[in-house]
Amino acid sequence: MAAMLEVKDIHCGYDGTPVIRGLSLEVNRGEIVAIIGANGAGKSTTMRAICGLLHPERGQILLEGEDISRSPASANIRKGLSYIPEGRRLFPKLTVRENLELGAFTVVDRKVIDERLEEMFALFPRLKDRSTQTAETLSGGEQQMCAIARGLMSAPKLIMLDELSLGLMPSLVEKVFETVVLINRKGITVLLVEQMVQEALEIANRGYVLQTGRVVHSGSARELLDSDEVRKAYMGM
Amino acid sequence: MNHFLQVLFDGLLNGLVYALVAAGLSMIWGVMDVINFAHGEFLMVGMYVSYWIGFFLDVDPLFSWIASGAFLFIMGAATYRLIIRNSLGKSAMAPLLATFGLSMVLKNFCMNRFTPNFRLLSGTVLEGKTISVGGAILSVPQLATAAFALVLLACLYWMLKRTRLGWAIQATAMDSEAAELMGIRTENIYLLVFGIGGACVGITGGLMTSYLAVYPEVGSLFSLIAFVVVALGGFGSIPGALLAAIIIGLVESFTGFYVAAVVKYAAVFAVYLAVILIRPKGLFGW
Amino acid sequence: MNTKKISDGIWYLLLAGALVLPFIPGGIENTFHGHVLTMVFLYASMAQAWNIISGYCGQTSFGHAVFFGIGAYGAAMAVVQFNSLPWYGAPVGALVAALVSIPISAPCFRLKGHYFAIATFAIVEIFNRLFMIWDWVGGAIGLDYPILEDGWRNFSWSSDKTGYYLGALFLFALVFGVVRWIDSHRMGYYLRAVREGQETAESLGVNSSLVKLSAMALSAGLAGLCGAFFAQYNYRVDPPMVMSLDMSMKFVLITILGGLGTFWGPLLGAAVLIPLQEYTRAYLAHLGSGVDLIIFGLIIIYTMIRQPTGIMGLIRGLAPRGRDASNDGGDR
Amino acid sequence: MAILTVRNLTKSFGALVANNDISFDVESGTIVGLIGPNGAGKTTLFNCVAGLYRPTSGRITFEDRDITNLPSWRIARMGVARTFQVVRPLKEMTVLENILVGAYMRTGNPAEAMASAKRCMEMSSLSHYMDRRAGGLTIGNKKRLEVARALATGPKLILLDEAAAGLTTTETREMVELILRMKSEGVTILMVEHIMEAIMPIADKLVVLNGGEKIIEDVPGVVVEDPEVIRAYFGEKYSRRLRKGAKEGNDDGRDA
Amino acid sequence: VAEDKVIKIGALFPLTGPSAVSGQNCLNSVLAAAELINGAYEGFDVPLAATEGLLGGYKVEIIKADHQGKPDVAKSEAERLYNQEGVFAVIGSYNSAATKPASAVAERAKKLFLCGASSSAALTEREYKYFFRHAPTDAIEATEFTDYITYLNEKKGAGIKTLGLIYENTEFGKHAADEGKKAAAKIGLEVVADVPFNNGATNLSSEVQTLKAANPDAVFGAALGGDYSLWVRTMKQVNWLPKIAINFCTGYQNPAVQKELAGDGDYFMGGMSFSPELAKEFMPEALKVQEKFYFPLANQEFDSDSLQEAVMLLVLGQAIEKAGELDTEKVREILATETFVSPLSLSGEVAFEPGGQNIKALSVITQIKDLKYNTIYPEKFKNAEPVYPMAPWDNR
Ligand SMILES: Nc1ncnc2c1ncn2[C@@H]1O[C@H](COP(=O)(O)OP(=O)(O)OP(=O)(O)O)[C@@H](O)[C@H]1O
Ligand SMILES: Nc1ncnc2c1ncn2[C@@H]1O[C@H](COP(=O)(O)OP(=O)(O)OP(=O)(O)O)[C@@H](O)[C@H]1O
Ligand SMILES: [Mg+2]
Ligand SMILES: [Mg+2]
């Protein structure tokens, strides 16, 4: 079976400074794949390239066999991608509820939107309490929850999560990773970037290790967890 | 006190025209945080379009505003594509100065092509018609423009608040990248916003030819007032622009009559400053 | 590091050349290029004065025509109304400009981004219109200099520009000297810190209101001095000449074209824009009305699209490549 | 001796009370950790102490001087430095220049400022990036820059808001070392952190906030055991792991 | 073609900017005069027409310069013309505000500066030696206006007692209004409304409302084209008119503006020193020159302002001929002392008093009707009876 997402030897950067230099990876349907790496390794850049916020200078990105390396992010979202960016990027002046509704912008049916809203509120009850507050006044953690919920509102096939755990309290981190597993059980493929290597690899099927814009290790999550190199470099052991 | 009534109506009518001029600017400013410095020149171009159509084809401004609106829609969109998109995000002042350059080009192009002569359409349907309300005399062309202003502003407001497109525009205004991630085609939104901004001012210009002379410098004062209206109203806010424009119109006509005509704009700018210092983001600003 | 020193060296060499120029026959005297060079240094000084508050401190002011104008009126009032010398009027004008700038800008500093810009537009318009009806300063009719004896005493020359040129050069040295000093001391860092993030700067002990106000007063005072020079040079002052948005735009355009917030940017901008403006007007006007201004506008658009960091950005864009290479070498 | 005292601090935003009647002390020369669920009001508290927000009521004193309503730059000058949770580099300035701004607080002399900035830069291992534009740094380096810049002001008390968030475990270790070095130089530290590996081993005392109220203030060992904290903050699984400590290779919790 | 056989003359006008319309007309007029001088043309009773060039074959070359309506630009362009282009004299500069510093340059450098249309009386009160101006000053025009009012009051029992002034608040408008007020005071006309406005107006309703409220018998106006048509239309809109309205130059004089006002401009009056109607009778040569030289360049008729610039070039040409050489001092001496024949001037001749004012300067008052400028005062030039008071708006 063909991979859901295939990244073939992409190169990209900002203003001529190369960041990603020849990166390839693939994500199969139904998997959870984790990308790990040091700060500045290019994890976020990879994600941005996949979802179309940034176009690679060379290489190909295939979503279900279709080349999406040149299409804008909005088009990719409509094809079933969803990206929850680093730094949340909520609409600061809109309420939590409005933010969530915008997450389902591609959905026209009002009823579907309402159903999904309820699902999200069930997942994150705290958001329900805050649903009329504007996003800018949420605490860091609340904002993160709102961002996840917003990303799920479009009912994507593949969801990409960038540093979900950033700034979350321990019990929430746990909860969020549980949520990821839950999402995945529903049939949504997950590609995630994490600093919490241990936690990420615990839920992932496979993982890639990035270093200065290239994949230096890849394999099943267990392999990586057991690899001395990975443990030394990223888990401080 | 029939002077009072007259002055009041003059102020209101003028204010509505200012609101119409400012609406397009406000949208562009609100959505993209770009000041279109060539806004006044857009108005001037709109007036020329309508003037030439009236002059050669004998079409009344009452109808030719459609053409000038369409023309300016295209011009606005083209300005976005060719100028704004390339200067956006490079430095805060780049789009403003680029459009300043554009304003120089447009003004002097018209100067060069159409001569600096004042051109006034004569024999238009509404020309010289007036109606009298309680002793005050109102000019019908201005009244028509004002009525148009109200309708157009209402449409814009409805579009922004009640339609999916409006939602998309607002989201894009707040964070374009995040909007893109919601599946909103932000590139098209920008294009559209600049087009709509252009169309608004094109329509205004088109209608204004029925009572105002066209010449290459006609836009300068209007654009200055439009800046002030938008800033006073709070950028991106249509009701804000409307209220601010009416305030400006009234200040202008009341100081013009009761104090001295020569200080009326000084008063307008001073009132703007006074308000903005109390409410730094304008009357309806966030 | 080194590249910076070398490029500064080039600049100082050029300036030394500029200083000996008037002593070469045909260097300045009565020539058109003498006029253009004088204007280059005047406008470079103006732009640099503006650069203090708008470039270094990030408060883009479109209101500097007001301060420029007050300085101009200072000199002109001294000469025309009080039959005195510009040497008294100019400093008084500059001081008044600096003082006026404080109450004006203090409330405006609460405004952000374009709101600040538009408020400063409004201030220019208010001053313009008030000076237009203020009879004591000549109102709409303006102030015209009588014909004075040539020389430094009156700071007025009729057939030789050398005096004006040296005056402009001195003004330039003064303004650039002040900025150079600021740039390398605490004030310079504080200005830029306030530009990059006011709250952050305050968390580092920067009293941002004081920093902004003092930068504004300094900037306004220096702009006022430039205005005084302008009045002396043109024998006339009226509000549209010195207190107009057009004048304000010149401050802005020159600096941005050269490189906002950079030390040499204003000189570069003036050195490109002023000759361009003078020569296109002088030699392209025959193409029909406004062609020079159309070309001017196109250049502005082009710059903003292709090189919004100005000419300094262009130069820097070339330099780092060299530096990176040497860095890589050093690492090994 | 308490260098910082917070007494009955309340801060509300409209109807929402972000800090409710909070009191605690920070002893000179110690590391105090401020933890609590997301939205508990930790950043708000920091902002009140640093002068960015005006408290609704209550009193904050620093070295026995009332700083409750002072502007933030004055508080900074008295010796309270802070970092921001959402990093705020002075983007267009280089790393060195960023730190210099802090260094200039204590001296107007360029040479002295440069010397002290360089020292702070080395301490936070940023020397390699000296001439880089701060805006282009990675999150990790930006976090370090926040700390270095605050350090350059020569503070007596430093407020660190999630200085380790977003860092890899290895990087977190480096950050912890940096914090300990600061402590050894006599700087008092009040830090907010969600990464327990970064805070538990070094904190002398933890203050736990929940829903804007202080629920407990004690040494880490006690806090970890506190059922209310576990329920509100750590979660069962996590606190189990915490209690086990980092001494064992903890590959037991792996499921999926 | 010998390069030396050229006399360079600078033409410094506002070719761009707010007064560019007039500036371009002025330039064209100077160009037309230069053509007349340079070629040999039969059948023109104009000095210098029949001969080719000056001083036996020297061609006049016009060096154009644009001051954009800005005094500082005017000053530096004047310097460039004298120093860089080496012009013998400069003609200009329409806006008095620009003429002032530009002519100061000339005076300091002891070069000739000839001014056609700038009307500020201050220009010739400076006692300059090298400055000569053709146009009647605002003071002369204002006196003529009040003379006319006296005439109406005495001869026709018009009973004009009150005066309103509406003028752009620029150096032109302010000067004109000041002179208007002075002249009014002399004949005991009471000023009941004094309304300066900001030029480039987009709406004049408060201004007109102020006038209407004061309801003066007579109004003096000073406004450029766009403002002028807006003023007239606004008066129509509020349905008010004074008994008479007399204008200082510009807007009123511009046939293009009048054409677009399409009859709404009728019955207004203004000071003029040229109109086709006037020319037909008193200056037929001007019409011929217009037909042959000006029309092809400008595609329109002369107006008072532009024609005077041409006159100044012709006067300068005559002075150069008389001097017999290109010597500034000699030419200046001749300009200052002699009287020149000038078929393109209403008075037929030109002579300058110390300070440079043309003592023969003459203007008439015209009233426009059906796009015709009929001369109504003084008696000598009169070709129509005035319509007095102006026909009310609803009766046209
Ligand atoms: N907008 C940008 N402009 C210029 N350079 C950038 C930009 N964004 C990222 N970079 C650079 O690209 C490189 C990779 O950044 P990226 O954000 O992809 O790293 P990351 O692996 O996600 O790191 P982190 O864990 O810190 O998020 C870094 O060196 C960074 O400095
Ligand atoms: N400016 C503000 N206006 C309104 N509400 C605010 C504002 N700032 C914070 N809040 C609210 O105050 C509460 C506390 O926020 P705070 O940022 O202090 O939390 P925190 O403890 O730092 O959380 P986190 O660990 O997620 O950063 C939150 O519920 C937040 O929504
Ligand atoms: Mg990242
Ligand atoms: Mg926080």
Image (cartoon, rainbow, N blue to C red):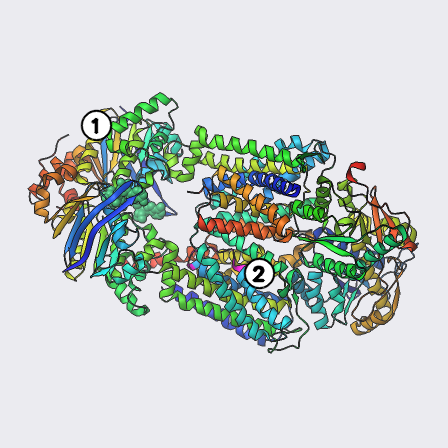
The one of D114 and B121 positioned closer to us in this rendering: B121
Q: From this viewpoint, is residue A121 visible?
A: yes
Query: In this rendering, is residue C113 above or below B157?
Result: below
Distance Cα–Cα, label 1 vs label 2: 67 Å
Q: Is mark 2 within 8 Å of ligand 1?
A: no
Please state the chain letter of the residue tagged with numbered disc 2 in the rendered image: C
User: Looking at the rendering, in which quadrant would you find the N terminus of chain A?
Assistant: top left
Quarter-of-image position of residue A133: top left
Q: Is residue A132 magenta?
A: no
Q: Position of residue D86 (x, y in %)?
A: 29, 47
Q: From this viewpoint, is residue A213 visible?
A: no
Secondary structure at numbered mark 1: helix
Q: Position of residue D113 (x, y in %)?
A: 29, 66
Callout 2 environment at 10 Å: few (<14), some (14 to 19), or many (20+)? Answer: many
The secondary structure that dominates the magenta segment is loop
Q: Position of residue B193 (x, y in %)?
A: 50, 36
Q: Position of residue B248 (x, y in %)?
A: 56, 45
Query: In this rendering, is residue A65 above or below C215?
Result: above
The one of A202 and C128 positioned closer to us in this rendering: C128
For residue A182, the mark is: 1
Q: Which residue is mark 2?
A: C274
Secondary structure at numbered mark 2: helix
The one of E17 and E159 positioned closer to us in this rendering: E159
For residue A156, the mark is: none
Residue at (58% x, 38% y) in the render: B16
